[in-house]
Image (cartoon, rainbow, N blue to C red):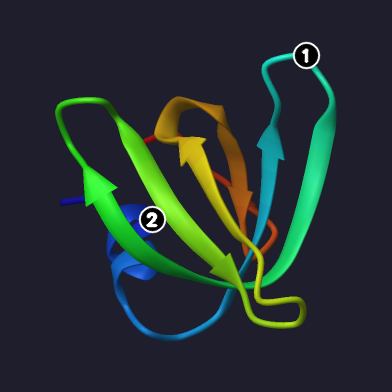
Amino acid sequence: MSTAADMLMKPDPVDLVVMTKGGRVLELNNCIGLKFDKYKGTRRIKMLSSGQIRTIRDILIMKINGCEVML
């Protein structure tokens, strides 16, 4: 497993920059990873500040804690 994937599996909060299906770039701050589906390539994350839960595709994650990544 890569370092970036390890960061998302730990209970420590991270900051993410992701691209949406529509091509917008979102900055998601103070998030924790909840669940990973390796067959779909998706990940459920929770934003601690709002409590909102989102499902994102791993290939659309551009940065974790300010570092560019490829998952």
Location of residue 24 in the rendering, given as x and y in whole percent from the top left corner: 84, 25
In the figure, 42 relative to 2: above or below?
A: above
Task: Choose top left, top right, bottom left or bottom right for residue 20.
Answer: top right
The answer to which of 59 and 49 lies nearer the viewer is 49
Q: Where is mark 1, residue-wise? A: 22
Q: Position of residue 70 (x, y in %)?
A: 44, 33
Where's residue 57, x and y in %? 45, 31
Q: Give the label, 1 or 2, closer to the camera.
A: 1
Check disc 1 and report its element: helix, strand or loop: loop
**Which amino acid does the dot numbered 2 rest on?**
Ala
Q: Amino acid at mark 1?
A: Gly
**Left of 20 or right of it: where is 32?**
left
Foreground of the two, 27 or 56:
56
| Dot label at residue 62 | none
> Which residue sits at x=26%, y=50%?
36
Q: Say whether residue 47 is left or right of residue 6.
A: right
Residues marked 1 and 2 touching at CB (< 8 Å): no
Query: Which quarter of the image is occupied by the C terminus?
Result: top left
> Which element type, helix, strand or loop, lies under badge 2?
helix
Residue 11 sits above or below residue 36 on the image: below
- Residue at 42% over, 53% down: 44
Residue 4: assigned label: 2
